[in-house]
Amino acid sequence: MLKRKIAQILEAWKKDANHNPLIIKGCRQCGKTYSVLEFARSHYKNVVYINFFENPSYSDIFNNSLIVDDLVMYMSAVLGSKAKFEKGNTCIVLDEIQECPPARAALKFFKTDGRYDVICTGSLLGIRGYKENVVSVPVGYETEITMYPLDFEEFLWANDIDDTVVDYLKNSLASAQPIADAVHKRMRDLLLKYVVVGGMPAAVNAFIQTRQMDTVLQIQRDIVNGYRDDMIKYAAKEDKSRIRECFDSIPKQLSKENKKFQYSDIRKNGTAGKFIGSLQWIEDAGIINRCYNLTITELPLDGNAISDIFKVYMSDIGLFISMLEDGTQADVLQGKLLAYKGAIYENLVADFLHKMNRRLYYYRKDSGIEIDFVIRYKGECVLVECKATTGNAKSIKTILSHSEKYHVNRAIKLGDYNIGENNNILTLPLYMGFLLTER
């Protein structure tokens, strides 16, 4: 069983005496259903489980009335002995709630009634052309959170790295003291494995159980193909082919030296007018993340973001690797990254930052200054560069030497080296990127 951080969030939600029905959204197959059922079965005497995707007919339960007593009666009739209701000790789990818009509307009534807790999952909530758009969301009567595939820390847990090691890394970061060689070597090795395995639970479980990378790769490609099928099945008719083209262009977009997303790289003469909705669909499905260029390196970052200049990264590093040509997994594990070296390391850091619920930003100017990521860290605007090996960090040095112009005093270099600090530049091993959580 994989240890997931969502369990702590669910614990805190249940302890809140005034909690709303909970909606957990996220990309398909990131572990939502398993985590919710595991929590519900260990914290409630009764769990009533309804999966609208596997059983479309269950939508009929919500078609006639949204009064809680009526819904309980309908669920009892349809589910039989599987549905037992007891005030204060029953959790109703509504899986893939986007398949049944009236069930989303019913959350208001469950909240005001208060007898039963409700947890919902949703993979395609709110995307263009989907069922969600035909029902109003019960604002104020639900709590929505996003779940991601396993992050690097969860991957470490899955590989029997306990909290004492993670605490050691955190303390080393706080004191800027180098990591001991034995730990450093182990973390570097696990990082390379995380790059190729990523965080999709099925891929991680296959890796832990078999250590067979071909098995992991097949699972990843099945997930990616499932995403492509969703694009055909659920997107509006006029968007279907464009969404697929947009999605399949991502590896090529990231292979460029200037990784700015270009609509013309999707299709010859491609324009924003043709593809902007397609890209938004993929982002809303939780498959990709945008990283926005900044007008200036200054807080607040969101206020300085340029909305139409951005890079695009896959939300999970392992799925990105699976979209590259055969043999890439072995190349990564052996350090032979070739043309995709920059893309892989950038997508890795984007994976770290996104899974800690950060929005992504970078800084690039025609003058030649380019910073991979810009984050709020410990209350300051901080530059983040990720490199496979050491480098001279020319752009970082330029910005730091003109701090009065750029409003930046600190930078972090993530690469294949140990911890060090010099002239307000903190160098960290790439594997420590997951610890940059402090805002």
Image (cartoon, grey):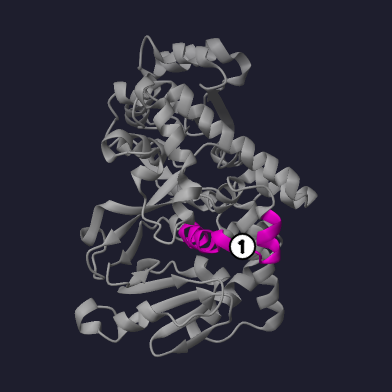
On the image, the x and y values in percent for residue 53 come to 53, 22
Q: Is residue 344 left or right of residue 267?
A: right
Q: How many marks do you count on the picture?
A: 1
Q: Is residue 246 above or below residue 337?
A: above
Residue wearing tag 1: 337
- The answer to which image quadrant residue 70 occupies is top left
Q: Determine if residue 416 is in view.
A: yes
Label 1 crowding class (10 Å Cα cut-off): few <14, some 14-19, many 20+?
some
What is the three-letter code of the residue carrying label 1? Leu
Could you say whether the residue bearing mark 1 is in a helix, strand or loop? Answer: loop
Q: Determine if residue 95 is in view.
A: no
On the image, the x and y values in percent for residue 156 come to 64, 61
Residue at point 41%, 84% (across, down):
425
Q: Nearer the viewer, residue 73 or 311?
A: 311
Residue at point 60%, 57% (across, down):
154
Residue lying at the far bottom in this picture: please name it: 423
Q: Is residue 26 magenta?
A: no
Q: Is residue 345 magenta?
A: yes
Q: Nearer the viewer, residue 375 or 314?
A: 314
The span picked out in magenta is 329-352
Q: Is residue 293 above or below residue 150?
A: below
On the image, the x and y values in percent for residue 323 come to 58, 45
Q: Is residue 173 left or right of residue 363?
A: right
Q: Is residue 145 above or below residue 362?
A: above
Residue at point 39%, 11% (across, down):
63
Q: Nearer the viewer, residue 167 or 308?
A: 308
Quadrant location of the C terminus in the rendered image: bottom left
- The answer to which image quadrant residue 379 occupies is bottom left
